[in-house]
C-alpha cells in the first residue's frame, strides 16, 4: 500500500468508525472552548470537563472572568495542573479580549496566538471547532499515529502538522483531527497496544512499528 492508498484507506475507516466526531471538551461558545483548551494542556479532557462547570458557573464570559481574583480561578482549576500559570493566563487573556477585541474571541489565528497561554495548537483548535476554519491541530495522539502509520517522520509536531495538511484534503481536516484522536484513544494507545484491535496499524503501519507490536508466532 503506497502513501496515497494509505491515506484513502485511513480516511475511509475513520469516517466509518466516527462519522460525526463530537468536540471532546464541553463548551457553549468560542470563549468557553478557548478556556477549556487552555486548561487541557498536560491534562485529560475528562478532568477538564469535571472542572469547567464550577468555573463557568462563576464566569463564562471575559466580562465576568476579569471580576474574579486570580487566586479564585487558581483554586477552581487546581485539579487540571499548572494552575498558577493557567489562572494568570485566563485572567490576562480575558482582559485582553475586552481591551483589544470588544470582549469577543477573534476568528484569527495570529490574534489568538498573541493571547497569554494560547499556543499554536490551542489557537488551531478554536479556529477549527468554534469557527469551522480548516485547521489540523496536532496533539500527542495525532503525532504518534502519523508516525505509526508511516505518514510522518515523528521529528516534531510542526513537521507532523505540515505532513497532515499536505496529505489529507482540506475539507476533511476539522473532522479528521478529531477522528484520529478518538481512534488513538480507543485502539492505538502509546502503551499497552493490542495488535488484534489496531486495524489501521495492521493495514497501514510502518515496518518498524509492525515489528514492535506484532505478536511473535
Image (cartoon, rainbow, N blue to C red):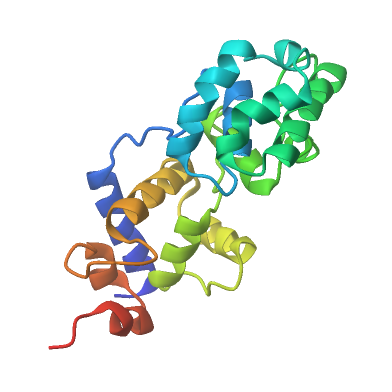
Does any portion of residue 29 appear in the rendered image?
no
Q: Position of residue 152 (x, y in %)?
A: 50, 70
x%, y% of residue 120? 68, 47
The image quarter containing residue 85 is: top right
Instruction: Tell me where residue 109 appears, x and y as whole percent.
Output: 71, 38
Residue 12 appears left or right of 184: left
Identify the residue at image location x=35%, y=47%. 182
Left or right placement of residue 177 versus residue 89 in this view: left
Please report the residue visible at 28 percent of the width from the left and 77 percent of the height from the top.
Answer: 213
Q: Is residue 195 above or below residue 122?
A: below
Q: In the figure, 63 relative to 207: above or below?
A: above
Q: Is residue 150 above or below residue 48?
A: below
Q: Residue at x 78, y 35 (%)?
A: 115
Q: Quadrant of residue 29?
A: top right
- Location of the C terminus (image quadrant): bottom left
Q: Quadrant of the N terminus?
A: bottom left
Q: Residue furthest right?
A: 99
Amino acid at each position: 500500500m503506497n502513501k496515497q492508498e494509505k491515506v484513502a484507506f485511513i480516511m475511509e475507516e475513520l469516517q466509518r468508525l466516527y462519522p460525526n466526531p463530537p468536540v471532546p471538551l464541553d463548551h457553549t461558545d468560542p470563549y468557553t472552548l478557548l478556556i477549556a483548551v487552555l486548561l487541557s494542556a498536560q491534562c485529560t479532557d475528562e478532568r477538564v470537563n469535571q472542572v469547567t462547570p464550577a468555573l463557568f458557573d462563576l464566569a463564562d464570559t471575559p466580562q465576568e472572568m476579569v471580576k474574579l481574583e486570580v487566586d479564585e480561578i487558581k483554586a477552581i482549576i487546581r485539579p487540571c495542573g499548572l494552575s498558577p500559570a493557567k489562572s494568570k493566563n485566563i485572567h490576562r487573556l480575558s482582559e485582553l479580549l475586552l481591551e483589544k477585541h470588544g470582549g469577543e474571541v477573534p476568528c484569527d489565528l495570529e490574534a489568538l496566538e498573541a493571547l497569554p497561554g494560547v499556543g499554536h495548537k490551542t489557537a488551531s483548535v478554536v479556529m477549527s471547532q468554534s469557527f469551522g476554519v480548516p485547521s489540523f491541530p496536532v496533539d500527542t495522539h495525532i503525532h504518534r499515529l502519523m508516525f505509526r502509520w508511516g505518514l510522518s517522520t515523528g521529528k516534531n509536531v510542526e513537521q507532523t502538522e505540515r505532513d497532515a495538511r499536505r496529505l489529507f484534503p482540506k475539507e476533511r481536516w476539522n473532522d479528521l483531527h478529531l477522528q484520529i484522536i478518538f481512534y488513538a484513544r480507543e485502539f492505538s494507545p502509546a502503551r499497552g497496544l493490542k495488535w488484534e484491535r489496531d486495524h489501521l496499524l495492521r493495514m497501514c503501519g510502518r515496518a518498524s512499528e509492525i515489528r514492535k507490536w506484532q505478536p511473535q508466532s
